[in-house]
Amino acid sequence: MNILVTGSDGMVGSRLVKYMKDRGHTVSEFGDNKDIRSSADWGTFRGEQFDYIVHLAALAGVRPSFDQPDLYYDVNVNGTARMLEFALADGLCNCPRILYASSSNAYEWHGNPYATTKMMNEIQCLNHKALGMRFHTIWPGRDDMLFKKLQRGDVTYINNQHYRDFVHVDDVLQAIDIIMDKWLDIEEKVLDIGTGHATPVSEVARVMGYEGKYVDENPSGERVHTKANIEPLLALGYTPKWNILDYENSPS
């Protein structure tokens, strides 16, 4: 297959590029040297025919989105619009199938600007041959995410109220691979990507040796409890392999 990956320099994208190349696929990379909002940058791929676009590029993170809502809208919504324009450029389909990164935050899309942009992406893609992937909490994750911060000892407090469906990035790659392989069997327009288990954030912190402050509060705009519905993925053959509580035996 010929695959175009946006966000190819990111945490998931860089691993997906290697994963797909290792399986013999041809992968074109839309990385940090290009802007997904730029029609000209999309134009550098004009004329190529792709079997899939995997659209991962976006501004991520709940808390930063409160400070820069306009930028989040511009990158995430306008960037996705440019992607869709490219896929159907000049009335010719440069790509018949699109996978794009949504988020578990879309379940509570009104809670923060980031979540709102992800729900808007889902609406944008409704009338296209596109499938949204509602990623839950991917680990090891970015440097600004909890797992990496716990590893660095860069955490000021842990919220006892929060539960998260922590899914290892290798399980995310497995899910993407299965979705591509089973595309014709999928009726959903959006799929949850996770493990189907909600783990207390406090338990993860304790397993990782955190001995600092624990609080009972629910910051505005943040989801309290997340748990993926992976029944549709299980029916396709997906089997999540990694448990964050056994992180020491997982791939890095």
Image (cartoon, helix red, strand yellow):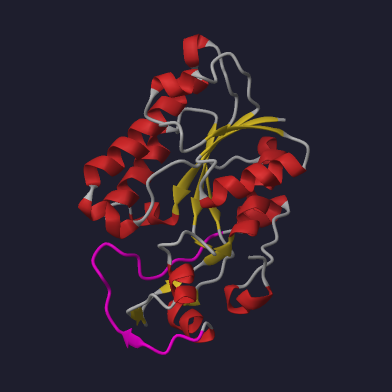
Q: Is residue 119 visible?
A: yes
> Which quadrant of the structure image shows residue 146?
bottom left
Question: From this viewpoint, which residue is outermost toward the bottom?
Answer: 211
In the depicted structure, whether residue 89 falls above or below residue 107: above
- Residue 14, position as x, y percentages in the image: 58, 46
- Residue 147, position as x, y percentages in the image: 48, 70
- Residue 215, position as x, y percentages in the image: 30, 84
Q: Is residue 87 left or right of residue 96?
A: left
Quadrant that contains the N terminus: top right
Question: From this viewpoint, which residue is outermost toward the top?
Answer: 90
205 drawn magenta:
no
- Give 36 or 181, whichever is nearer the viewer: 36
228 drawn magenta:
yes
In the depicted structure, whether residue 202 falls above or below residue 178: below
Question: From this viewpoint, which residue is outermost toward the right?
Answer: 24
- Residue 118, position as x, y percentages in the image: 38, 45
In the depicted structure, whether residue 7 falls above or below residue 111: above
Please tell me which residue is depicted at 67% across the width and 39% down the height of the picture.
Answer: 180
In the depicted structure, whether residue 233 falls above or below residue 46: below
Which residues are drawn in magenta?
Answer: 209-229
Quadrant that contains the C terminus: bottom right
- Count every numbered label the image shows and give the total: 0
Please tell me which residue is depicted at 46% across the width and 81% down the height of the picture.
Answer: 205
- Give 218 or 68, whichever is nearer the viewer: 68
Q: Is residue 179 visible?
A: no
Q: Main secondary structure of the magenta part?
A: loop
Q: Is residue 125 left or right of residue 99?
A: left
